[in-house]
Image (cartoon, rainbow, N blue to C red):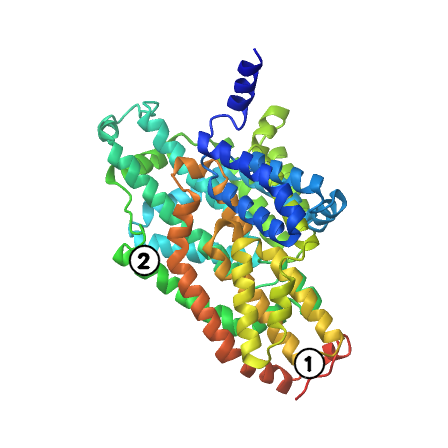
């Protein structure tokens, strides 16, 4: 009986995850306390790598459970404390509220989003132009909104497209009363159509995700760490944009060129075309909805459009925290479209809450990184260099550390260290300004290499859409690779070639004379 109970507990452990995966997690849990007693620093890095492993295996088992078990053990054996984990959660409360409320708010605008993007998809026949449209749209939106919000929009749109296909493929297709000839080809869907359609949607999702990075690096609201850096440097919205532009504008241009080349030459699984059968389904579905849309439906679309305008204005002018604006979107979009039952509203939160829980675990891992001072040796080493070498090393160090941990954490740690160096007189104000640009671009650009580098990528990987499109951790890394190489190299070259000239121009224009009284040493010019 005891043996049977043990087997039952083991079988229940992590559910349907592969046997080798269960044994790997148990192995991690067994060896971590021993590593910690011998070398806490090494144990910290082991935990980080193990957590990345759980993210990489997200399609085998959702990372919340194995990652959560590793973190609980880490707290128990003293790698970090509950207070420090709570501190990290409090510091990142805006990001958590954003996920809970903004993603749910986008859910209530899905009719409008699907309407707009279906028109775009059916009118724009060229895959190349469509890919560029998705990349540019995501970049522009991310510059004024937040990358997570934009990815939530894209996930909603892609899920809508996939569900249209799935309804037809599973035999639940709609029929026009007047026209049956249009529906005849709908029955000829093949397995290849499904694979091609998945590839097509994967392409658009990845282009748009990269777009969020291209636009998110440009402004102080694009990513959470941008806001932290802007506050430390005492820069406003315009100054932040201009200071970043010597790096961000060339990167944006080369990012778009990369999109064109990947699609044109069908590299790294890009260039997948929308199958004609599926295009016919989407065209037909679009016409079907247009025909049956009532005045009440049009009123809903109009309300959602007005709410979308409020969303852009509210976020663009920073009238409140992003999550609170998301809450207003939920209230407005539901109140004026007749969604007033609790169970209807509950569906909107299903997508975001598992990821929110995972993100809190992630902040716990960040607490381990802080307590065990895993990044301190790298920071100390980089600060021993000077001039352009120092800037390039800051850019690369931020990029590499962001790939393995989180760009928000890395950016905030580095800007705090550089701010302390400025206060102590170790660096001048113009050095500080250039290092701030190197830190911001370093955390935002090379971090596209892995899903854990950017929260928006991680959100997509752990969304319900990823398994539908067969978008695994490895697939995301592979498809992001050409962008990672181009963005990292162009960013590094721009940091090396352009930053000194831009800083001198700023001082010549007396743009930031008002800052020198506020922050440390006077400029050396």
Q: Which is closer to the viewer, label 1 or label 2?
A: 1
Question: Which one is in front, 265 or 432?
Answer: 432
In the image, residue 361 sits, relative to residue 450, either above or below, namely above
Disc sitting over residue 262 in the figure: 2
Residue positioned 61% across, 34% down in the render: 334
Mark 1 and mark 2 in contact? Answer it, CB < 8 Å.
no
User: Residue 370 occupies which quadrant of the picture?
Assistant: bottom right
Residue 355 in sight here: no
Q: Residue furthest bottom?
A: 525
In the image, residue 441 sits, relative to residue 500, either above or below, namely above
Distance from label 1 to label 2 (Cα)?
42 Å
Residue 53 in sight here: yes
Q: Residue furthest top?
A: 1
User: Residue 238 occupies which quadrant of the picture?
Assistant: bottom right
Secondary structure beneath label 2? helix
Question: Which one is in front, 225 or 369?
Answer: 369
Disc sitting over residue 428 in the figure: 1
Residue positioned 74% across, 79% down in the render: 425
Q: In the visual, does 443 lie left or right of 416?
A: left
């Amino acid at each position: 009986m005891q043996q049977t109970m043990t087997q039952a507990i083991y079988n229940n452990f992590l559910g349907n995850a592969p046997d080798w995966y269960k044994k790997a997690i148990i192995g991690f849990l067994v060896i971590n306390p021993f590593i910690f007693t011998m070398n806490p620093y090494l144990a910290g890095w082991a935990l980080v790598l193990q957590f990345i492993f759980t993210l990489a295996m997200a399609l085998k088992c959702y990372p919340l459970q194995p990652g959560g078990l590793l973190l609980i053990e880490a707290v128990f054996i003293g790698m970090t404390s509950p207070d420090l984990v709570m501190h990290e959660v409090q510091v990142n409360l805006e990001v958590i509220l954003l996920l809970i409320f903004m993603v749910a708010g986008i859910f209530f605008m899905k009719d409008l989003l699907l309407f707009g993007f279906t028109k775009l998809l059916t009118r724009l026949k060229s895959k190349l132009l469509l890919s560029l449209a998705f990349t540019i749209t995501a970049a522009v939106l991310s510059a004024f909104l937040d990358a997570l919000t934009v990815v939530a929009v894209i996930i909603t749109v892609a899920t809508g497209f996939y569900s249209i296909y799935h309804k037809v493929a599973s035999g639940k297709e709609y029929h026009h009363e007047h026209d049956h000839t249009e529906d005849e080809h709908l029955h000829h869907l093949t397995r290849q159509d499904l694979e091609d359609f998945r590839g097509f949607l994967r392409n658009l999702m990845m282009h748009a995700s990269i777009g969020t990075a291209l636009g998110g690096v440009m402004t102080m609201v694009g990513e959470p760490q941008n806001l932290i850096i802007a506050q430390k440097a005492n820069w406003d919205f315009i100054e932040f944009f201009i200071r970043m532009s010597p790096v961000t504008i060339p990167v944006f241009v080369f990012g778009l060129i990369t999109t064109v080349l990947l699609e044109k030459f069908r590299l790294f699984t890009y260039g997948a075309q929308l199958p004609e059968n599926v295009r016919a389904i989407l065209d037909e579905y679009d016409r079907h909805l247009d025909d049956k849309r009532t005045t009440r439906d049009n009123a809903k679309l109009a309300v959602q459009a007005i709410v979308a305008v409020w969303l852009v204005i509210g976020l663009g002018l920073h009238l409140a925290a992003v999550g609170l604006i998301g809450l207003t979107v939920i209230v407005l979009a539901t109140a004026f479209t007749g969604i007033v039952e609790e169970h209807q509203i509950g569906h909107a939160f299903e997508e975001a809450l598992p990821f929110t829980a995972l993100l809190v675990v992630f902040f716990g891992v960040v607490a381990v990184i802080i307590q065990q001072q895993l990044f301190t040796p790298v920071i100390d080493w980089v600060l021993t260099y000077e001039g352009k070498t120092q800037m390039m090393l800051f850019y690369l160090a931020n990029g590499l550390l962001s790939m393995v941990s989180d760009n928000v954490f890395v950016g905030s740690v580095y800007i705090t260290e550089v701010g302390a160096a400025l206060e102590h007189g170790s660096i001048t104000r113009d050095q500080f300004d250039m290092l701030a640009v190197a830190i911001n671009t370093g955390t935002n650009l090379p971090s596209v290499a892995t899903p854990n580098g950017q929260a928006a990528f991680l959100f997509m990987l752990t969304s319900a859409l990823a398994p539908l499109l067969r978008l695994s951790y490895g697939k995301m890394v592979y498809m992001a690779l050409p962008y990672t190489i181009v963005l990292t190299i162009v960013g590094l070259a721009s940091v090396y070639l352009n930053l000194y000239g831009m800083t001198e121009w700023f001082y010549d224009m007396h743009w930031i004379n008002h800052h020198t009284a506020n922050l440390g040493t006077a400029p050396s010019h």
